[in-house]
């Protein structure tokens, strides 16, 4: 929600480019978002641990370290929005106790650091925080919208804690908070898809379990578009499912990929073998059924470039 009293701006200030601060801006989604914002005329600052990595990935952006952010006392009047995409990859390794702690701390620590920055500098604007459709847990064939009650699972525990950390901002009347619950973001340039595609490129199609579990995804191009949509439509707030309108079952996904890569053989990875190899991560990332739809995005007038998997695959 925006403050009721807007400062009077002169003609010079109105002509200045709008500026965005991205935490995690050198990561998979972040660097593509930064490029898109830059092309639209925004000034982009990126906060991260490694300034050289930021400059290499996004040479047009201004790198800011977490330490310098913590020491900042200047009013960030140039920032229209802060986008937080920071968090250790949930698919980076087996979910041991140590890994679960790393997944949680990498998310909560970043949120808390950014909240301290916002409070210290009296930030007024839009704050967009990443989350994931893992928030809902497995729901079988049920169509999942933003109002669907979550199932009890580790993914929900993680995402719920991540989102709850935003409460001090949600209670702040001058800050509009949006939560972007991402499905699997599909791109040849990173994320999960290159690993998914490996067996298909070797001419072997692999289906996970019985293939009946729903898979909710979004093209990277649309994920970036959705974030910019949330930045620019200042009446929007709350949680948004960042997924394509047409989820599909793993069996159908396997068929699409098999046709695209002209595979010669189809195999099934049995659920017990996946669980033995990957433990709880297999249950919640590969075998859980999440039929998630972007209800609030569509109701708000957002249009997708890639509605279905077949149209997206044709762009590869």
Image: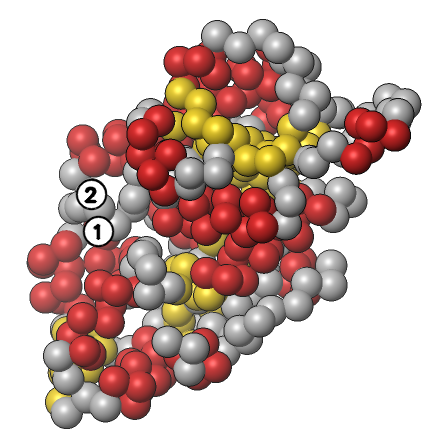
Which sits earlier in the primary sequence, circle 2 or circle 1?
2
The structure residue drawn at horizontal position 48% and vertical position 16%, both measured from the top left corner, is 69
* Residue placed most toward the observer, 98 or 265: 265
In this view, 85 is above or below 147: above
Residue 88 placement: quadrant: top left
Is label 2 or label 1 in front?
2
Q: Is residue 301 above or below residue 163?
A: below
Residue 131, horizontal then vertical, whole percent: 47, 44
For the C terminus, the image quarter is bottom left
Where is residue 230 drawn, in percent x and y? Answer: 65, 48
Disc 1: which residue: 280
Is residue 260 depicted above or below 242 in this figure? below
Label 2–label 1 contact, CB within 8 A: yes
Quadrant assignment for the N terminus? top right
Quadrant of the rendered structure where residue 78 is?
Answer: top right
Give the SS element for disc 2.
loop
* Image point (9%, 57%), residue name: 277
Q: Is residue 279 left or right of residue 73?
A: left
CA gap between label 2 and label 1 equals 7 Å
How dense is the environment of label 2, judged by Cα within 10 Å: few (below 14), some, or many (20 and up)?
some
Residue 37 percent coordinates (x, y): 58, 46
Q: Let me know if residue 217 appears in the view.
A: yes
Q: Secondary structure at mark 1?
A: helix
Q: Determine which residue is flagged by label 2.
A: 95
Q: How many marks?
A: 2
The image shows residue 246, relative to residue 238, as above or below, that is below
The x and y percentages for residue 260 are 31, 86
């Amino acid at each position: 929600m925006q403050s009721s009293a807007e400062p009077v701006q002169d003609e010079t200030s109105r002509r200045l480019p709008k500026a965005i601060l991205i935490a995690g801006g050198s990561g998979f989604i972040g660097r593509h978002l930064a490029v898109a914002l830059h092309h639209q005329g925004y000034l982009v600052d990126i906060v991260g641990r490694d300034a050289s990595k930021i400059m290499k990935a996004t040479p047009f952006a201004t790198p800011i370290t977490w330490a310098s952010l913590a020491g900042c006392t200047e009013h960030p009047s140039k920032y229209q929005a802060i986008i937080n995409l920071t968090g250790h990859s949930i698919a980076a390794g087996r979910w041991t106790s140590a890994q679960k702690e790393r997944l949680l701390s990498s998310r909560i620590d970043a949120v808390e650091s950014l909240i301290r920055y916002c409070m210290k500098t009296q930030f007024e604007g839009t704050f967009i925080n990443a989350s994931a459709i893992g928030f809902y847990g497995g729901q079988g064939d049920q169509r999942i919208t933003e109002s669907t009650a979550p199932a009890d699972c580790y993914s929900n525990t993680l995402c719920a804690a991540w989102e709850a950390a935003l409460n001090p901002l949600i209670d702040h009347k001058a800050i509009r908070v949006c939560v972007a619950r991402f499905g699997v973001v599909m791109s040849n340039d990173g994320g999960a898809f290159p690993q998914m595609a490996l067996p298909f490129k070797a001419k072997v199609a692999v289906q996970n379990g019985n293939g009946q579990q729903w898979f909710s995804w979004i093209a990277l191009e649309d994920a970036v578009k959705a974030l910019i949509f949330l930045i620019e439509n200042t009446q929007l707030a709350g949680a948004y499912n960042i997924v394509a309108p047409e989820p599909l079952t793993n069996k159908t996904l396997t068929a699409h990929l098999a046709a695209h890569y002209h595979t010669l053989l189809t195999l099934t990875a049995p659920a017990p073998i996946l669980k033995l190899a990957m433990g709880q991560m297999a249950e919640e990332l590969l075998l859980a059924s999440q039929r998630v739809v972007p209800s609030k995005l569509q109701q708000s007038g957002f249009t997708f470039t890639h509605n279905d998997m077949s149209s997206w695959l044709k762009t590869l």
